Amino acid sequence: MHGTNENNQVNEGIDGTHPAGDGTSHATATAEGAGLKVADANTTVGGDAEGARAESRALLTARRWGAARQAARTGLKAYGPDAELSLLLALAHAAEDDDDEDDRAEEVYRDALEVFPDHLGLLAGYAELCLRSDFQDRPARKNRGPALAARVAELAPDSPEALRVAQVQGAPWLTAARDKAARSPRIARTQLYDLRQALAAGRGVRTAAGQARADAAQRPDDARRAMLAEALEVLDRPGRVLLLPLVRRPFESGLVRGVLLGALLVAVVGLGLPQWVWWAGIAAYGALPFWLGRVLRGARRRGELAAAAHPVPQEAPLPELAPVPPYSSRELAFGLAGAAVVLSSLVGAGVWSYAKYTAYPRYEVVSPDSFQGMKRVWNSPLNQMLAEAAVAVPGDFKAFTEVYGDPTANEGRIGIYGITGDWHDMSPRMLTSFADAARAGAESVGATVRTWKPEAGPAGGWLECVEVTAADGYGNTTCLWGDKGSFGRVTIADPDLAARADSLTRELRAALVHPAVGAEARSS
């Protein structure tokens, strides 16, 4: 959406010395091309004004939009109307790639054209800004584009400005795509490429840093060289050797890290490792790139500040840094493979983990007629107590109650109340909460409570026992078990059996609850 012209851009001597920057707007790309050098009768002439133009051009080239605008405004205030300073100011607004900044750029163009109505650079830049505008957002600006384009063609029909405006007028979206393709690579890509070149041929970091610092001293205006020197000096510090594989082989190292992350995630799920290992692996995967990014951003900031202090190009017998080539097919293949490995690992491990979490074992309940010499009892006080404790369960669960003791005396010595079904949320904490509820009820009536957590036995899960002794000496012991497919509560009313409460619970559970034959775990 931004206008510019190739004849009125940053000085040709600057081309190739500035850092490749983040692609922002069309004005940014073309302003870095070959020079906002205006030789026009409508431009004021003066040594001081030329200094303001040079400063603004250098800041625009360094992508310091705000500083470039400030330098242009200062020059306009100090030296009066100036076509080139106005053009620089408008381009610095448009380079922000923001609707509000586009509005400010338009104000600058219109004010300047009142003073310099036939200035080709201003007309072409304003025409392109208007032609690239969205009709729905800025209909008036869009409608001004054709008239401005016609004026440019009338003043200089064969000029580069007229040709470019005609291209934008004919296919603005195509021209924008071409501009994007012609832009310099992102500054992070350029910086990483320069580092790889500096470390090539087996040179150590310290040697490369010394050479880069010497080159930057000869060309203090070259931000690329300054950023390279800063980055190499930081990478030469202790502990930064871990970052070098990401610099030398960024795509290959990304694939290796992705494979390692995938193996770790699979191990966490398959081996049942703690959940924190999962998150630690993901954090470790991103830690090195994050660290390298911080290092390179700091180096870019320091390098840009150093170069901005020397806006005038310096002559030095140094070759220009090599242009950054596009990504090779090999790099793209490694990058895509690394992304695919990480994505598939996260998705696969996540699905597998969820499936394991929601799966639960199926059980069948078979009640024997006797248990350790005790017979089934149907109507004892213990039967009634367990019946009162039983709660309604959803349809997917199955509840059962059994009491064993002396049926002749209608005495229940040990009883069980259990539920089978989807208990995939069962955990030691949940089982303890059930035991805490029983303890709280007993303590509320002045009873003494003792709890312990014995081994659950071969059936797995968790086991917790609560012994309650009332003030009058009467007591009973209750043991709770839980796993992903069942929950049970065993109450021992016979004091003679209390000493074996945990072992009796394990044995009674094994006698009644059996894995379902042919059942397959499913997700709830």
Image (tube, rainbow, N blue to C red):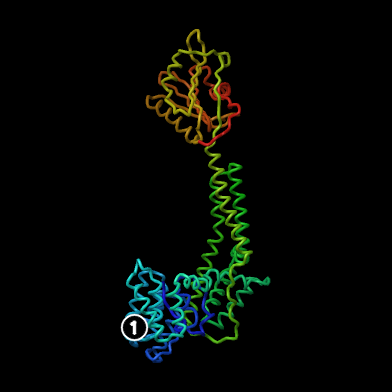
Residue for point 55% across, 43% down: 353
| Nearest the eye: 285 or 76 | 76
Q: Position of residue 183 (x, y in %)?
A: 51, 73
Q: Which residue sits furthest top?
A: 408
Answer whether residue 275 is visible to the viewer in this image: yes
Q: Position of residue 510 (x, y in %)?
A: 58, 24
Instruction: Give the amino acid at mark 1.
Output: Leu
Instruction: Tell me: residue 490, above or below residue 326.
Output: above
Residue for point 38% across, 81% down: 150
Instruction: Tell me: residue 236, above or below residue 17.
Output: above
Image position of 252 (left or right of 287): right
How many marks are shown on the rendered structure?
1
Residue that mark 1 sits on = 113
| Nearest the eye: 329 or 210 | 329
Q: Using a 10 Å C-alpha cutoff, classify the residue at mark 1 as few (fewer than 14 neighbours), some (14 to 19) or many (20 or more).
A: some
Mark 1: which secondary structure? helix
Q: Position of residue 76 (x, y in %)?
A: 35, 84
Instruction: Tell me: residue 317, above or below residue 492.
Output: below
Answer whether residue 427 is visible to the viewer in this image: no
| Nearest the eye: 369 or 96 | 96
Image position of 73 (left or right of 33): left
Q: Position of residue 185 (x, y in %)?
A: 53, 71
| Nearest the eye: 496 or 395 | 395
Instruction: Tell me: residue 172, above or below residue 254.
Output: below
Quarter of the picture holding the N terminus? bottom left
